[in-house]
């Protein structure tokens, strides 16, 4: 399993994601803690809300402040998007109904998403020295 973080404003929710089309999916499971989409051949994605406190755990305090300066939202919301196939992730990000104002944090890994998204929507996690 791999993951990226979706970063949005207060409108980032399961409801806004469910407005998307998930072509050829065979099952959508939603509960309070996650939204899971399954496809044939055992492909899946799982969206899970992630709190600011959980995000901060992976950073030194000054690093987290620098990270927040990269985010254009005054009160950002995060979702972890877990996936098992990069092709499924790419298809979701290409969906016309994927929220246009959501940023993608690849947790420092170059997934080649700049080929399908405006690079300005991809957050780098290499923090400048403060």
Image: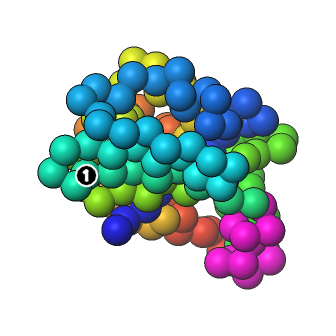
On the image, the x and y values in percent for residue 32 come to 69, 49
Residue located at (46% from left, 48% from top): 36
On the image, the x and y values in percent for residue 85 come to 24, 55
Please state which of residues 128 and 62 is positioned toward the viewer in this rendering. Answer: 62
Residue 68 in the magenta stretch? The answer is no
Please state which of residues 17 and 117 is positioned toward the viewer in this rendering. Answer: 17
Residue located at (39% from left, 50% from top): 45
Prevailing secondary structure class for the magenta stretch in the rendered image: helix
Quarter of the image that includes the C terminus: bottom right
On the image, the x and y values in percent for residue 72 come to 72, 39
Quarter of the image that includes the N terminus: bottom left
Residue located at (53% from left, 68% from top): 126
- Disc 1 crowd rating (10 Å Cα; few below 14, some 14-19, many 20+) is some
Q: Quadrant of residue 42?
A: bottom left
Q: Is residue 69 visible?
A: yes
Q: Is residue 59 left or right of residue 34?
A: right
Please give the count of numbered marks on the rendered protein: 1
Residue, disc 1: 43
The residue segment tinted magenta is: 52-62
On the image, the x and y values in percent for residue 3 come to 43, 61
Q: Judge whether 67 appears above or below 112 on screen.
A: below
Please identify the residue farthest to the left as the structure is shown.
41
**Protein image colouring:** rainbow
Q: Is residue 50 left or right of residue 97?
A: right
């Amino acid at each position: 399993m791999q993951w990226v973080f979706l970063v949005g404003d207060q409108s980032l929710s399961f409801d806004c994601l469910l407005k998307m089309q998930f072509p050829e999916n065979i099952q959508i499971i939603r509960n309070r803690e996650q939204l899971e989409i399954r496809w044939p051949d055992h492909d899946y994605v799982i969206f899970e809300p992630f709190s600011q406190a959980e995000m901060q755990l992976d950073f030194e305090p000054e690093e987290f402040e620098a990270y927040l300066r990269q985010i254009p939202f005054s009160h950002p919301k995060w979702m972890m998007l877990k996936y098992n196939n990069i092709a499924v992730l790419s298809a979701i990000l290409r969906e016309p109904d994927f929220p246009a104002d959501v940023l993608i944090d690849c947790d420092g890994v170059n997934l080649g998403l700049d080929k399908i998204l405006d690079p300005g929507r991809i957050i780098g996690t290499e923090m400048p020295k403060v």
